[in-house]
Amino acid sequence: MIPTYPTLDFAASLHGKIAFVTGGFSGIGRECVQALLAHGANVAFTYADGREPEAEVRKLVADMPERLSAHPLDLRSATSIRQSLNAAMQRWGRIDILINNAAVGSATVRGYADDLEGQDSAMLNINADGTLKMCQNFLALMQNHIGQHSLKIINMSSVGGGITAFPGFRLSDGMSKAAVAFLTRQLAAELTGSMIDVFAICPGATNTKMFQASTLNPMSPEQRAEFTERLPKRRLIEPAEIANIVVFLASGYSTPLHGAILDASMGLGVRPGIMTEHTH
């Protein structure tokens, strides 16, 4: 006898859900916002307070005010973290899906400090401590909702630090991403008896402004072509591909993956030496 299974499409599973996406104005975060909206969720997203154009942010919300809200956020500030979450709660009444996407990289962190020591501190404060405080405040804020329906925490780490180590990778960058992966495992261990699912995604070389600034922009066209040729599948990962994974994790299908640290690097995590291998 052929077994039958209940059908659950993404639109049905996310319809009416409230997602909170940090760093939702650009890159992977922007694609996450668009993908979640397309699959029926309402979305609150954050933008870097004073560092991203508020006029453009307001225009995005004005185009879809019944489905979208925007909130300033400085991940270095516990007060700013609380204010952004509280503002989203006031707008939507609850948050079902927390997506910790906002981060800085080896190039973009230079906007926070001129010296290397200050940049390292900013990297750890934003990527690691900011994600920690966001998770803690989200769990405290949603305490009264736990048990009524399932919640999701989706953290964004990186293949460098979250999965493996690469020589020459900035220490504070890898440390911050490793901390996010550890935080995910620890939260998952503590929340196995709850209706809260926790995951981390570890992208590889993704076609974002952050990756372009840190890696591609200093290269000549010839170097860039050679670099791309050495990547798994001989191409960059597109932000929309990571957003599709986020949609899956936000859906009802993902609960068996609770605690998973997902290697989303197209094979770079299992074969990190591919970048320096020479084939003949």
Image (cartoon, rainbow, N blue to C red):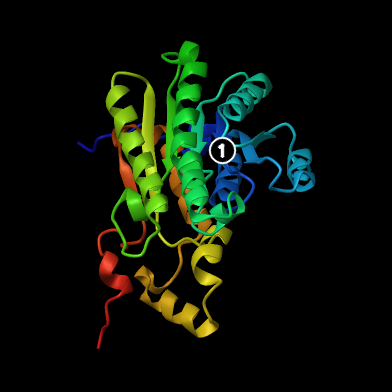
Compared across the picture, whether 159 is left or right of 247 comes to left
Tell me the residue at 27%/77% (across/down): 277
Rendering coords of residue 221 (x, y %): 54, 82
Rendering coords of residue 276 (x, y %): 30, 75
Question: Is 105 drawn above or below residue 70 in the view shown?
Answer: below
Q: Nearer the viewer, residue 221 or 261?
A: 221
Question: Is 209 drawn above or below residue 144 in the view shown?
Answer: below
**The image quarter in which residue 47 lies:** top right
Tell me the residue at 35%/65% (across/down): 168
Question: Is 243 drawn above or below residue 192 in the view shown?
Answer: below
For the C terminus, the quadrant is: bottom left
Q: How many marks?
A: 1
Q: Nearer the viewer, residue 69 or 105?
A: 105
- Secondary structure of the residue carrying tag 1 is strand
Compared across the picture, whether 58 is left or right of 280 comes to right
Hey, what amino acid is under mark 1? Val
Rendering coords of residue 232 (x, y %): 35, 69
- Residue designated by label 1: 21
